[in-house]
Every structure is written in structure tokens, then in C-alpha cells.
Image: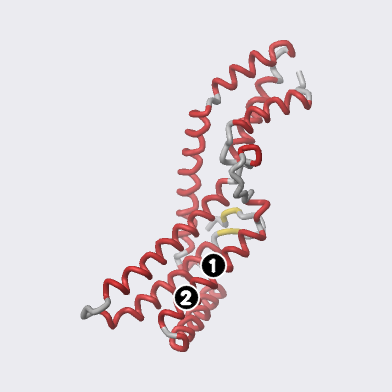
Amino acid sequence: MKLSENEIQTIKTRLDRCLIAYQEIYDEILDHYISALEQELEENFFKKKEELDDTFSWSVIKGMEKDLQKMAWKEFTKVVLSSLQLWKLGWLKIIAILLVSIVGYLAFLYAGPEYFYTISLISIGMLLVAIIYYHRKDIGLNFSLDPSKHQPKKVLQTTVFFSFIFAFNLINLFAQLIPKLLKNSSYEQFTPLVFLTLGSFLIAITLTIYQSINLKTLKLIKP
């Protein structure tokens, strides 16, 4: 039988209650429900749906989410690492990276180590916020804690978002701790180099992720 709109909405209501994290899993389970129920007689709809509800229990769905997360991180990491292979980038991208490096170094000499790092952090942060805001509908960005407003997100967008957050927090932690550890030590003169390295690393990470992601579709650019 072909499912009615009310029957499809009944399925979606159940899936919405599961608070599924990723759109890919939501679509896959919804398609499985519809395909299975269309092979049943109309009077068996609710009985078969209950069987499917048991098959796709909360624990099963969470297991599917974890597996998808692992797959997304593995694929994303592979693409990002391959984009670090400068010899594969082509001359235009290599020249662009060199120009950015030169500008960054001149900014370091002009502004000083701490201001250079601060400018790098703010600039990259503003770029990240702008990208997230521009693609907020694609990402499904939602800060509401109300379960009724929950929306599944695409796994790659979530992976990219958290990779940025993780890199930002890790680099900023080093920027705060390392200079304090070097202070009043024989290695204190290396503090400017620490800020130069971390600021440049922020820029490098942003460029790497930028050239690994198609910003129009937020899909991975295969090497």
C-alpha cells in the first residue's frame, strides 16, 4: 500500500521524539519505515510500526550516530591531512599561502607578538562566525533546549564545526600556558616565537579546512 500523509506524519512524530542528531540517519530510518510499511496491508500498519519502533530503539539509534560520527571524523581527517601536502595544491594555492605567510610575518613585526596572536585569533574567529551564520540553515544551528525545536544536523557540518572549536580552544590554551611557563626562565626569549607559531598555526588550520570544504555545499573536496 502507499502510505497516506497522516501515516507518514505518524512515523515522523515518532522519529522526532527520538531526538536524532544527524539528518543522514533520520532520512535513512524514515526511508526504512516507509519501505517496510508500504509492503504491509493497511490494517497491519500500527503492528508493523511497533515492530520497527523496537528495531530502531533509542539505544540502536545512538549506536548508529556514534558509527556515523567515527566515519565522518575519519573521512574529514583524511581529507584535511591530504590538503597539507603542499606539492598537491598547485602553484596558485601555494603562492596564496606564501602571500598570507608574508603578510602575517609583517604584521608580527609591526604589531608585536601578543597583538599578532590576538589579531589572528579575532580575525579567524570572525571568519568562522561569518561562515557559520551564512550557513546557519544548512548547519541547522539551534541553541534552543526545547525538544520540540530540535532539528537533525548533517554530520559533516557538525564535524567541521567542532574541529574548529577544538583547534581554537587547544591553540588558545597553549597561548595562555606556554608564555607563563617560559616566564623568568632561560627560555623566556622564545615567547615571541611561541605567539608567532601559534598565530601562524591558526591561519594554517583555517586555510587547510577552507580548501578541504566546498563552502557552497559544505561537502568534502576529495583530493
The label on residue 28 is: none
Residue labelled with disc 1: 125
Q: Is residue 35 left or right of residue 119?
A: right
Q: Is residue 88 left or right of residue 195?
A: right
Please rate how many residues cluster around mark 2, counting C-alpha atoms within 10 Å: few if below 14, some from 14 to 19, many from 20. Answer: some
Q: Position of residue 19 (x, y in %)?
A: 58, 36
1 and 2 marks in contact (CB < 8 Å): no
Residue labelled with disc 2: 118
Mark 1: amino acid: Gly
Q: Is residue 67 left or right of residue 132?
A: left
Say which quarter of the image contains residue 149: top right
Element at label 2:
helix
Q: Position of residue 111 (x, y in %)?
A: 46, 86
Residue located farthest toward the top when viewing the structure as drawn: 43
Whole-number angstrom distance, CA of label 1 to CA of label 2: 10 Å
Q: Position of residue 79 (x, y in %)?
A: 49, 56
Q: Would you place residue 138 above or below residue 36 in this image?
A: below
Instruction: Name the residue nearer the viewer: 159 or 13.
Output: 13
Mark 2: amino acid: Thr
Which badge, 1 or 2, is on the more N-terminal residue? Answer: 2
Element at label 1:
helix
Residue drawn at x 61%, y 31% is 17
Q: Position of residue 73 (x, y in %)?
A: 47, 49
Instruction: Name the residue nearer the viewer: 177 or 42.
Output: 177
Q: Would you place residue 95 above or below residue 29 in this image?
A: below
Which quadrant holds the N terminus? top right
Residue drawn at x 35%, y 79% is 193
Residue drawn at x 64%, y 27% is 14
